[in-house]
Image (tube, rainbow, N blue to C red):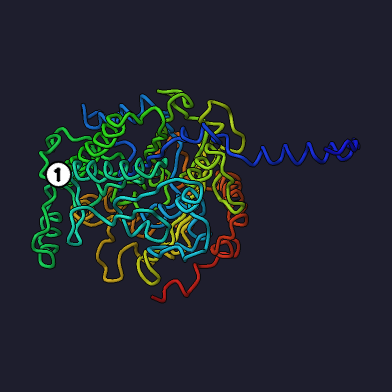
Amino acid sequence: MSSKKISRREAMILMFGTSAAFAMQSRFSSGEKDRRPNIVVFTVDDMDITSVNCYGNPLKNLTPNMDRLASQSMRFTNAHVSSPICMPCRQSMMTGLHPHSNGSMGFVEVAEGACPSLSGILMKNGYYTASIGKGRDYKAFEWDNWINGLGGDGWYSRKPAAFYDETKKIIETARDADKPFYIGVNTSDPHRPFAGSEQEKEFVANVRKQYPHAPDFPVMEPVCSEADVPLLPYLPDLPDLRKETVQYLTCVKRADDTLGKIMELVEEKGLAENTIFIFFSDHDAPMPTAKQNCYRHSTVTPLMIRWPGRIKPGSVDSQHFVSTLDIMPTLLDALDISVPKRQDGRSMLPVLKGRKQNNRGEVFTTYNYVYKGTQVFPMRGLHTKKWSYVFNPWSDGVKKRLQGTGQPTDNQSGLSLAAMQKAAHTDPAIRKRLDYILLRRREELFDLENDPYSFNNLAEKPEYKARLNEMRELMIKEMKRTGDPLLESLIKGQSYPAQWDQG
């Protein structure tokens, strides 16, 4: 061995290089690699946050499994989804990018290679990855196992046992491969068609024409009577709304049953202590002013995150505003994996550890269209604890928020909007509300402390002009940061890009 002395400068370079090398290694290196946490992301489809008992639903024992998960997790009261329709929301969660950043402006797949995905990064870092259900929304990404639906013959199941069985097979495959796993479990409950509804009967009949052996949805007993049903707080009290809300909440119960089966499975396999378990809804219920809108209640979601030994069980965060955009960078940060430089989300790991995180006082949400030329009602929302600002470049006082045929959009189908339309003939208050729902205003400002469900638009009141300007500027700042294509529309008082109407 050479006895040559190393200079101070050379020693510093060597020490820095060694430190950098260690810094790039995962903290789960060598023997600890086997203890890398598994990950389960469980999503429900179209569920209002107030439908969960621990978020205030008074209907006894409706969501016992969601409540049990909350008691073991950090539960957020100011968590929002990035976009209030399924495909853009879920693809944003998988990329950490807004729909206008990853290209999923509507029901459009993120282009191959357009941006890194959570599943792709985890696969490169030794994880076995699988996605169950809501297949279209996750098809664009890399998976070891991608399952479009359950039940075969082009069908998908809402049977809790079907999700249990498929997840069990995936866990065992990952075990045989000696890999930790990431599993996305995505039930379609409580999405329409609701349990026992005419829509459900028609839906099953139509599928059966193509797939004669397709199974029925599991039969569910109504969770309560129409007289006792707790209504969604932004809708009027009408008989058909009570009827449809019972059907909707019955689907919520089935979603909770499915969650319970997956939690049971993780516990049976002895994996609960080493599994990060995340739960959220992809947006609000499929009702007027909820799904497919950017109001505060449209995008707030019941986010719960469990990580035994790392996150304080039963904790509630009502201080920080977080987004489903933050899930990808948070998980990568937790695993000591480099986060892609281009991200609209940011890691909330400090919050999960019980610390305060700065610049968490607002959230930005977006909706563009279903497809170009189809349900083009672009909106942007900016929400704080006190204020909500919504920008509707499509609203011109003439165009109505309906399909081109004049029929209701998906979130307004079924009994609810029809009941409001019928009641509007004799009830001036409902007529006024219905007109507003269908026509909107270009700018909307709401005082959430006094008006949490956005009934009273203050944007045109002179005494709120300064507040309106302040919220508009906050939105402009975020639109500039993310390269939002509606920025010019807001700044110059224009409509949305004309090509969006061209299917």
Residue at (12% x, 58% y) in the render: 214
Report x, y in % for residue 96. 51, 50
Report x, y in % for residue 472. 57, 51
The front one of 22 and 68 is 22
Question: For residue 245, what is the image quadrant?
Answer: top left
Q: Is residue 120 left or right of residue 374?
A: right
- Is residue 270 among the parts visible in the rendering? yes
- Is residue 460 among the parts visible in the rendering? no
The front one of 2 and 331 is 2
The front one of 237 and 290 is 290
Disc 1: which residue: 243
Q: Quadrant of the N terminus?
A: top right
Report x, y in % for residue 454. 40, 44
Q: Quadrant of the C terminus?
A: bottom left
Inspect the image, locate mark 1, and give the three-letter code of the amino acid beneath it: Lys
Report x, y in % for residue 124. 50, 51
Regarding mark 1 in the picture, which secondary structure is present there? helix
Q: Is residue 322 above or below residue 191?
A: above
